Each structure stands twice: as C-alpha cells, then as structure tokens.
Image: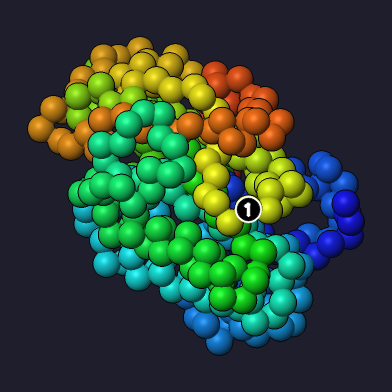
Amino acid sequence: MNKNIRIYVASADKAIGAATIKAFENAGYTGILRAEEPNLADQAAVNFFFAEEQPQWVVLAAGKSGGISYNRKYPADLIYNNLMVEANVINSAHESGVEKLLYLASSCSYPRLCKQPIKEEYLLTGPLEPTNQPYAVAKIAGIELCRAYRKQHGDNFIAAVPTNYFGPGDDFSPENSHVIGALIRRMHEAREISAPKVEIWGTGSPRREFIYSEDLGRACMFLLEKYESADLINISTGYSLSIGQLSEIIKKVVGYQGELTFDTSKPDGMPVKELDASLLTGMGWKAEIDFYDALRSTYDWFLDQEFKNKEI
C-alpha cells in the first residue's frame, strides 16, 4: 500500500473526519491533505479545491445532520445541504480523476420496519422512518450517485452505511446532537445544578447500535484499502442496547445522581435499528474499543471543550 497517497477527508474537524485522519496517521499514511476546506455546497469552490489539491482517495462523511428534533424542524435544510454536498464532491472526484472514494450514508437510509439485524439488500424495500425521511432520502441519493458514476464512468466509488456513531468532535449542542451527545450534555448540566430529574424523549424502549468514532475511522481506512465492490456495505459493532439502558450507562459515566424519566408523548423513531455487519467482519475487521471506555473518553472530551469555552 502506498503510504504517500494524497487523501482528502471531508469535514476533518468533525467526529468521523478527525477519527479517520487519526486512523490513517497511526497506520503511517503521510499524504493527508491539510488545505482549508471549501464550502462543500458550492460546486465551483469544490471543483477548484479538487483541481488544486488533486486528492487520490476521498472519504465523504459530510453534510448537515441532527437528532429527531432537528429533523422535524429543518427537513428542507437537511435534504438540500446533503444533496448539494454529496453531488458536488462525488462529481468533482470524478472530474479530477480520484482513484477511490468512500461515501458514508446513514442507517436511517433503511426502511423503518426492516427485519433485524438489517442487511445491505434491505435498502429501498419499504417506507422510511417519517421523522427523518428527507435526510434519509438525501443519503440514499449519495449511495445511488456512487453506483451511477461507477456504472457509467467506471469510477471506483464505494458506499458504506455506518451505525450510530459517537466520540470526540461530536455535536453536543441541544438542537443538533444525536442521542449520546444529547444525553451527555443534559445529564452533565443536570448534575451541575443538582437537578432532581432528567426527562428523556420517548419510551426508552427503542434499541440502537453504536460505534465509537475511532473504530469507525479504522473501518473507513480498512474499506479504502480492501473493499472494491459496487455493493453497499454496513459498518457496525454487533453491540446494541435500549435507549433506557444507554441512559443508565451515561448517567453512571457522568456521575448524575437524579432520576431519569421518559416523555412517552414524544416520538421514539425506529423501534429497532441494528445493522448486520457480517460482510465487513467476514473480511477481517472488528471493533476494538470497549463501549463504556468509549463513552468515558467522549465525556472527557466534552468536559475539556466546556472548560475551554469557559476560559474564553
């Protein structure tokens, strides 16, 4: 493997991007591009970036995202931004002769009531989860773009679906965060003011699978090194738990002493979302980081950011 290959990781300042760069660096890759990233929703800016930087490998894990609340409030923003970003980057990768591109979709791309665990061939076999349908449609479009450019032009563009990820660099804002980031922030703030309880959306019964960003970053590198198929491939750990169980673990990590309650008037989202990663694990990849340790590291990063913000 050429360790000097020029690698562009989109949104390198976010959780997936930072973890993927770390994986490449730890493996001895020296050609990671450090140029300022353009506005990925601007085709001209993206074209100029690719023409100037000439990346050979691309990891596309960019675009707006958020939890159920954000999806309900800003469906137009989500579908527009993700469609523009993926179309611009994938087309520029084609035009500039990129050797290989990995596009990361989302597990919400699969139908709401899929048989579990979800296999890659279940894509487009049923209705989507209504709470995030516009975002999911955009992510599906990215998968189809990769397939279309491969079919029409012979581009080596591959697509993967990661399970729910978390880790340093994640979004912990009240509006944009996903479930782990949201729970960490809310329980931390409740602990700081000794709040007697924290209310959580939904029943607590939906099951979710999670992957630590560093494991996901290593999976991205693994796929760029070894995967060549046009077929979609899942990235997951095989470890899942209910939102209620997750909440109790985060409560322990954060050290919150109050009560957890569930607002059953709020939507749960998909009842179960677990991915079948037998294709990936059959190639020899597996997650390495213990879930509790990963949560602890994520909370430590959150605390460090909070301390820096207070200093400012």
Q: Within the image, what quadrant is residue 191 found in?
A: top left
Tell me where residue 215 appears, x and y as whole percent.
Answer: 64, 35
Q: How is the image coloured?
A: rainbow
Tell me where residue 45 appears, x and y as whole percent.
Answer: 58, 83
Name the residue: 44% across, 48% down: 106
Residue 38, placed above or below residue 262? below
The reply, left or right, for residue 35 in relation to residue 105 is right
Residue 99, placed above or below residue 107? below
Disc 1, SS: loop
Residue 114, placed above or below residue 233? above
Q: Within the image, what quadrant is residue 269 found in?
A: top left
Tell me where residue 204 appears, x and y as whole percent.
Answer: 25, 23
Residue 100, placed above or below residue 70? below
Q: Within the image, what quadrant is residue 177 found in?
A: top left
Residue farthest left in this picture: 265
Name the residue: 52% across, 76% down: 88
The 10 Å Cα crowd at callout 1, few under 14, some 14 to 19, many 20 or more, is few
Name the residue: 84% across, 62% down: 5
Residue 66 visible in the picture: no
The reply, left or right, for residue 27 in relation to residue 213 is right
Along the line of sight, the residue nearer the viewer: 282 or 235: 282
Tell me where residue 35 appears, x and y as whole percent.
Answer: 72, 71
Number of numbered callouts drawn? 1
Along the line of sight, the residue nearer the viewer: 273 or 253: 273
Residue 260 visible in the picture: yes
Q: Amino acid at mark 1?
A: Ser
Name the residue: 51% across, 70% down: 148
Q: Which residue is mark 1?
A: 229
